[in-house]
Image (tube, rainbow, N blue to C red):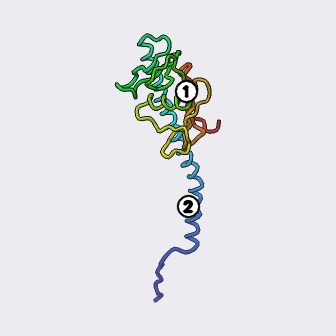
Amino acid sequence: MPAKTAHLGFTLIEMVVVIIILAILAVVAAPKFINLKLDAQIAEVKATGAAFKGGITLANVKWASQGGSGPVDNLQVFGDGTNGQLDINLWGFPAQNYPPFESSPRLNNVADCMSVWRTIMQEPPVVTSNPNTEGAEYFATYIGPDQCRYFYLAEQTLSIYYDSRDGSVITDSDPNS
């Protein structure tokens, strides 16, 4: 009678074939996972930009409902304290959030950009003027008269632009531009 031989494991060739198949799958699947991450980042910046734009529009409507002419200092836009007050510029859009009186508020430095960001959204993503700040999600920059740009720190080719002269909010969601 022939003796029965039992297989105790895989042969070397079987192991090599499995490793090659797994490597091919990894090469095909990895770019799709990378794109999913970028797609998620783009969606996050678009959502934040939309929330920011909604807040800017709400502040402008509040300004218009109060008479809508010229600059307004400390307009109560949200809540009932100084945290919900915005200084509205002569065009009717948020320029800053500072309690002291200012006859003609303007968006004219990075601190103003950050104050508008923090006031206009309820529980906004953390913004900073230093890109190395731990826990920050956006980096604010003052780019010219009455204009700010907020760069998304996880993917700095994505940003949100705000022009307080016309209230425009533009979300740059093309990482290749």
Residue count near mark 2 (Cα–Cα under 10 Å), binned few <14, some 14–19, many ≥20: few
Q: Seen from this angle, which residue lies furthest right?
A: 177
Residue wearing tag 1: 162
Residue situated in front as seen by the camera: 115 or 61? 115
Q: Seen from this angle, which residue lies furthest left?
A: 80
**For residue 84, above or below residue 66:** below
Left or right of 159 in this view: 123: left
The x and y percentages for residue 101 are 46, 20
Let me know if residue 36 appears in the view.
no
Q: Amino acid at mark 2?
A: Leu
- The residue located at (49%, 19%) in the rendering is 102
Let me know if residue 60 appears in the view.
yes
- The residue located at (57%, 26%) in the rendering is 108
Residue wearing tag 2: 22
Q: Earlier in the sequence, mark 1 or mark 2?
A: 2
**For residue 169, above or below residue 31:** above
Q: State the separation of the CA atoms marked 1 and 2.
A: 47 Å
Residue situated in front as seen by the camera: 161 or 135? 135
